[in-house]
């Protein structure tokens, strides 16, 4: 369990609180709400990080974002902060239904909030867009997964080995990421971040989710996304197929694509420049 102080993840003078939101009979999720130091007329942001992504990966973004926005930081069901009783599934449909329940519980207003989501979080937003009880003003989606590339070798390991063996396999997974999936020479921070996330992942939830994602594809969901959307790619990030991201932006009715080159840049305060520009396009002032 990672110990940290929430004040280190928001702008100076912010107010914050954590709550567990019941999304299913056996599942409740942790939502941390940050209020900026001064009242704001900007739309609140529902922030949904990626698969096993820790809040530490988003520290600099949250510090910048919470200076002016109310931010609801939602931790999805595979994370250790989720309270789960008994056996539950970890399909993409479960994640998307969870998001819809959180939007309803927070009473986010129709056309009155932004969704900011990354990787699996972004995929779940697309998958469950039609389930949302209210329509977002717009969405900023960083590296949504169109498919999940899990090589058969790794899928067999996940399927046949008990989660207790995860500790022994973890160094091998890191080695595989370094040499075959990531480019530490171009983005060392991304590799360090993923290693940190793996160190703190729940192996039981990780296994169930990986097996559920293996055959997933998002293509038939894209045409239903009618809110203005910014698809954020990183052309040096091999874990999030840049060609697929461009295809996603082409298929979605009101989307456009930007390339921030590295995963680290897309997880930095640089992204705030694009959020403010996006709001201006939507006719909303950034002050």
Image (cartoon, rainbow, N blue to C red):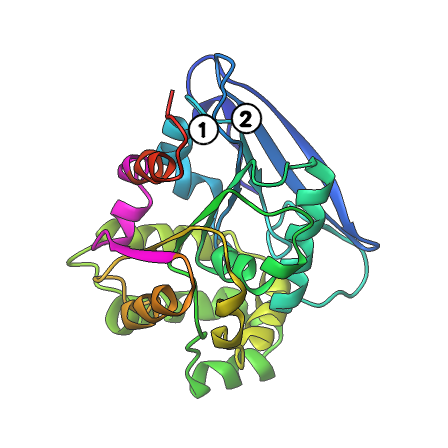
Q: Is residue 228 magenta?
A: no
- Most foreground residue, 243 or 181: 243
Q: Nearer the viewer, mark 2 or mark 1?
A: 2
Most extreme residue toward the right is 25
Q: Horizontal placement of 285 versus 21: left or right?
A: left
How far across and down, in percent of the image, does residue 253 sit?
43, 63
- Most foreground residue, 247 or 76: 247
Q: Horizontal placement of 191 versus 107: left or right?
A: left
Q: State whether residue 68 is above or below residue 207.
A: above
SS of the residue under disc 1: helix
Can residue 163 be seen here? The reply is: no
- Most foreground residue, 132 or 117: 132
How far across and down, in percent of the image, does residue 9 sit?
45, 28
Q: State whether residue 13 is above or below residue 110.
A: above
Q: What's drawn in magenta, residue-wise?
A: 255-273
- Quadrant into which the C terminus falls: top left
Q: State whether residue 91 is above or below residue 105.
A: below
Q: How far apart are marks 2 and 1 (CA)?
A: 9 Å
SS of the residue under disc 2: strand
What residue is shown with label 2? Answer: 34
Which residue is at 59% across, 70% downward? 207
Within 10 Å of the Cα at label 1, are there few (<14), some (14-19), or many (20+) other Cα atoms? many
What residue is shown with label 1? Answer: 9
Which residue is at 15% across, 59% downward? 185
Q: Horizontal placement of 255 versus 113: left or right?
A: left
């Amino acid at each position: 369990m990672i110990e940290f102080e929430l004040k280190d993840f928001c702008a100076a003078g912010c107010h914050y609180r954590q709550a567990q939101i019941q999304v299913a009979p056996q599942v409740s999720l942790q939502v941390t709400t940050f209020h900026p130091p001064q009242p704001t007329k900007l739309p609140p942001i529902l922030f949904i990080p990626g698969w096993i992504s820790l809040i530490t990966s988003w520290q600099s973004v949250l510090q910048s974002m919470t200076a002016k926005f109310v931010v609801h930081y939602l931790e999805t069901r595979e994370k250790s902060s989720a309270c789960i009783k008994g056996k539950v599934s970890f399909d993409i449909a479960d994640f998307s239904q969870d998001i819809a329940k959180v939007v309803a519980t927070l009473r986010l207003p129709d056309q009155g909030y932004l969704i900011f989501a990354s990787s699996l979080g972004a995929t779940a937003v697309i998958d469950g867009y039609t389930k949302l009880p209210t329509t977002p003003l717009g969405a900023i989606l960083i590296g949504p997964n169109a498919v999940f590339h899990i090589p058969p070798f790794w899928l067999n390991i996940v399927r046949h080995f008990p989660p207790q063996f995860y500790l022994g396999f973890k160094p091998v997974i890191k080695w595989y990421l370094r040499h075959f999936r990531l480019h530490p020479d171009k983005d060392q921070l991304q590799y360090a971040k993923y290693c940190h996330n793996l160190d703190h992942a729940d192996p039981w939830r990780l296994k169930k989710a990986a097996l559920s994602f293996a055959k997933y594809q998002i293509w038939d969901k894209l045409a239903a996304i009618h809110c203005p959307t910014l698809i954020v790619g990183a052309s040096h990030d091999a874990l999030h197929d840049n060609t697929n991201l461009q295809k996603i932006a082409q298929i979605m009715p009101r989307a456009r694509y930007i390339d921030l080159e590295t995963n680290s840049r897309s997880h930095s305060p640089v992204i705030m420049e694009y959020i403010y520009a996006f709001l201006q396009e939507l006719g909303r002032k950034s002050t």
